Image (cartoon, coloured by chain):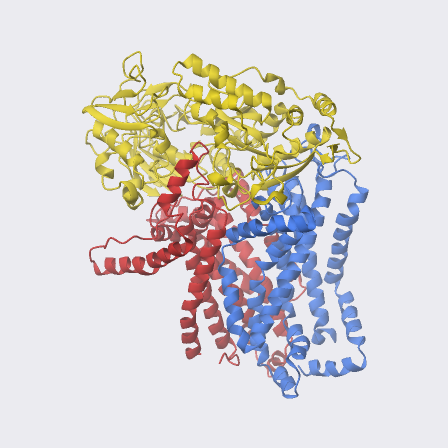
Amino acid sequence: MFHYTIRRLLLAIPTLLVISLIIFLLLDLAPSDPTANLPLTIPPEVRERIRESLGFNEPVHIRFLLWLKQFFVNEPLNVIESWLGLEQGDRLRVLSWQTRSPVVDLIVQRLPQTLWVVGMSYVVGVLIALPIGIYSAYRQYSWFDQIGTLVSMIGFSVPTFFTGVLAIVVFSVWLGWFPSIYDTTHKVTDWESFLFQVRQMVMPVCVLALYNAAQISRFMRASALDNLNQDYVRTARAKGVRERSVVLIHVLRNSLIPVVTVIALGVPQIFGGAIITEQIFKVNGLGQLLIIAIQGGDVPTVQTLTFIFAALIVFFNLIADVLYGLLDPRIRYD
Amino acid sequence: MRKSTCLLGALAVLASAPAALADRGSDGHVNIIYWQAPSTMNPYLSGGTKDLEAASLVLEPLARYNEAGDMVPWLAESIPTVENGGVSEDLTTITWKLKEGLLWADGTPVTSEDIIFSWKYCTDPAGGCAQSEKYNDVTSIEALDDRTVKVTFGVAKPFPYGPFVGAQSPILQAAQFADCLGAKAPECTDANFGPIGTGPFRVTDFRPNDVISLEANPNYRDASKPAFATATLKGGGDAMAAGRSVLETGEFDYAWNLQLAPDVIANMAAAGKGETVSAFGTLVERIEVNLTDPDPALGAERSTAKHPHPFLTEKAVRQALSMAIDRELLVEIGYGSAGRPTCNVLPAPEIYKSTANDACLVQDIEGAKKLLDEAGWTVGSDGVREKDGKRLSILYQTSTNAVRQDFQALIKQWWSEIGVETELRNIDASVFFGGDPASPDTFQKLYADLEMFANNFDGTDPESYMANWECKQAPRPETQWQGNNMPRYCSEEYDALVAEMAKTGALEERAKLAKAMNDMLMQEYVLIPLVDRGRVSAKSNTLGGVVLNVWDSELWNVADWYRVK
Amino acid sequence: MTEAVHSTLVDTKEPRSQWLDVWDQFRRHRGAMLGMAFFVFILLAVFVGPYLWTIDPQYIDIRARSQGPSWGHPMGTDQLGRDTLARMLAGGQVSLAVGISAMLLALVVGALIGVLSGYFHLLDGPLMRLTDLFLALPLLPLLLVIIMLFRDTLRAAFGPETGIFFLIVFVIGITSWMQTARIVRGDVLALKEREFVIASKSIGTSPFRMILRHILPNVLSPITVSATLGIANAIITESALSFLGLGFPSDFPTWGRLLYDATDYLQQYPERVIWPGLAISLTVLSVNYIGDGFRDALDPRIRGR
């Protein structure tokens, strides 16, 4: 397994390079333009000059190599220099076309709210989904299972653009319990401000958690159902193993493979942000950064964000593969 | 008061000072929401309206337009004119004089060097300044003394108020931006995000595309203003949520540009926490008719002047399309009090407004049918009119936007009543307005028979706006599909009027020319104007001093805003 | 898992009996039958309904706009006075057609790639890297590129509506198979090492037969879940596409679009949101129960009970 992991990690480098090239070509081909959002009163010649100043008109391979250099050479060097306390060299960083500021700084600025809201919703979602999924399978077609099915189907088929607005109308407008707009500048310093942070997180976290939990609990339930009827469960019961350990140790462990896959696919999404939910609650995290950059034709930002996203996908899928081996030692890759 | 405590914790301490003649900072905090988030505070690097308006809290021009569209001196002592000698007789120079004792937020004096620097900054060829058009034809700017500059144009400028007027071309501090000229401009992130200005506020924290925190400028020229000690400008989300946060939950004090259906706004306003304010500018929602053939079979030559449109070149067809539209109803459905039916593409200011075309205000389906009958278009078996094997079947495109899609559906129905078959298409706004020559879906390419969008002009002078329909402005492959003459309208007579206006100085004469151009476009029906679109914003009941201004930044008089107690 | 081998033997003698068994079991599953009945009802409603309820879903009766339910308009009218019932029926056709076909496409691609890369070690690396690539591609620019490249070609080849239908199904299918592929692969990796598979391999079962007889039936439950979630996903994604200008023309109703348009009017006219929301949820729910019943019916251990 160790060799396998090392090999996969090494293989990840060319994979990611290829992925980043494909993404770059895709963005280049996409019909978006950095001047798209400017008012129509700005004349075409001025737009052309803006494009030129952004380097938009350079050939595509030059722009790609420039991005590679800025992202893989200049940015890390800057980080190393600032760690060592050295004088910062005059290197060009990856600059966003929209804000004309370093993309990496934007990402660092956005990361806290995205991790808090989207990350928390994922944790909450998983924590709700696993027990519900197992219990639903254990008591298949009980009332609990039926209600769980109903809620998760509604949770998944009613999109967040609706549940989010509904939550705002009910809890902000009618009841006035929670703020409808997330304050990203809020700092938690004491109990009072912590409570405020909790209040402003409740709605977005719940809306997203419902969606995530719906999905994960279905996979958990299906997989647990498959395993509950296996021979080894019967054997374990026949041998007098306590029911609790049968379900929570034998069945759970064996039915986790699809769940681990789904969760591993979901974790990178946390960093991708939740575009719709972030928009609705004005969380302004990475998802909002990405969508604004896409709409504004801001290629460096989109490229950097999607690259980081791709790296996380490759990494977490590797983790999932390693976990398979731990969950079921019979799985071999070599 | 609940919202301020919950939003900013510390803020609950509302001074008990009397409302009249408040001191600077006595009214606490003001919350503003823009559903499009500002990405920079340097208006020269981004021409987006949201960025201009955010920057106008900090950076100021020499003169501004007020809510009536009149120019008012801002950093300048007065508006230079030919009468007061500020503009030379031959219309080639204009001399501006700064007010006395102006200070930047950091306490240093504002001088004529700063004005000259702002010009140099924006006209540096490597900088990609979004507002460089404002400085067109400026050949030199010299400092006559510390407070006076003389701007010289290479040609006679009948309207010399391009540079340093309005939110588009404010004055930057030379000291702060000295190292940021040209290609260096984007590297000055700190300066671009926190410019030192002369405005009522200064930036304390700027988060691009998210939120701006500001505080009162200690060196602002009026010692009693602004009334608010701090301000937040939050961005992002959608117009619906922005309106809701002001009108229904009361979390915010001011929401910008609520493009929502009138009954939605009315319902929100019924909550009683705030009200909407609206005003009209020059923005006209219109249908532009393609006079060239968009048939895909023509390949690279589609929608170019080489191939005239099979039936839209016929004036009767265009006129019938216009006559079948009920503009009153469109306004009622889509804009409510924020719209007015219009028959002009140049609806304001008052002196430019033509009344020659007002017949279009009344829908006339029968008249349209008669017109088509007379032109020889007969109704075929499927209800669609035909002539010489050509069917009146059109593709009608616009950008994705709830109101525009409602308009499309309504207009499609009216046209079907007169025997015109319509296919609708909507395109993502970032592609439609993107202008990428590789995409078939841009509004310049117009690979469709008709398209609908809205356009306006900065300030109050329509010269460059009316020049949009000059023959040479037609988008075509040779110009990389750039240009604003979407109908590909081409008339020597019109071009002559454009040239005439460029050298006419007297306001009366200019108005006459602009009206003539407008009437020509209207009576040829190459543009079908629909709605004169106003601006609707929302303010909370506790916010006073708001004067909605569509000619300049909406936040133009934020120094005068106060808390109603 | 001896039963599996056993049933193979039985199967060769009496080819029909297994499927009869499956059907018998399926019929006894109350949820599945209810789901099936409801699904058939929805299909009938949207495909036959428009012949009974003949109001044109695109007809604007501006005087009757924003009305509540009445005899003339049982579900009320929208902001332009179009009949909501007619729009629900017409919208259902598109939403169901797109939802089911896109789901099937994603399922087939996902299951195929998942099984191949799980079962054949050599294919695992390349196919999973391909999956990583598709997961990483930013959706919005990808869609815009696809529209730009293919819309006009397809429109010319199949006409505006069929062409766009193919394009939408293709786009949704091609961007949503990855999860199924990863999940199926994970399960196949574990199955491959189970005793019954090894036993079957030792008697020389060909890989093709092995996959069909032993692997696929055992990964059916995650596939069923993917199918249910896939329909919901496809219906919602379809509405998102029409905002990009990729979907059907804006006056062409679909459930996702009706839901989105109604969200702005949530407070004034809540019923407008409820209809499409309910239709999508119930459809997904019924597919879920059908899937449950199907899965149970195929499981020989349950079938015996």
Q: Residue at x 29, y 44 (%)?
A: B183
- Image-based side of A286 in relation to B126, left or right: right
Q: Quadrant of residue B262?
A: top right
Q: Is residue B545 left or right of residue B267?
A: left
Q: Nearer the viewer, residue A137 or B464?
A: B464
Q: Which chain comes out red in the rendered image?
A: A
- Quarter holding the C terminus of chain B? top left
Is residue A50 found left or right of C118 in the rendered image?
A: left
Q: Position of residue C29 (x, y in %)?
A: 74, 65
Q: Is residue C61 above or below residue A292?
A: above
Q: Which chain is yellow?
A: B
The location of residue C144, given as percent across then percent down, is 54, 49
Q: Nearer the viewer, residue A116 or B249?
A: A116
Residue C26 seen in render? yes
Looking at the image, which residue sits at the far bottom? C203
Residue B417, x across and y down, in percent: 73, 29
Identified at 59% across, 17% down, the residue is B358
- Chain C's colour is blue
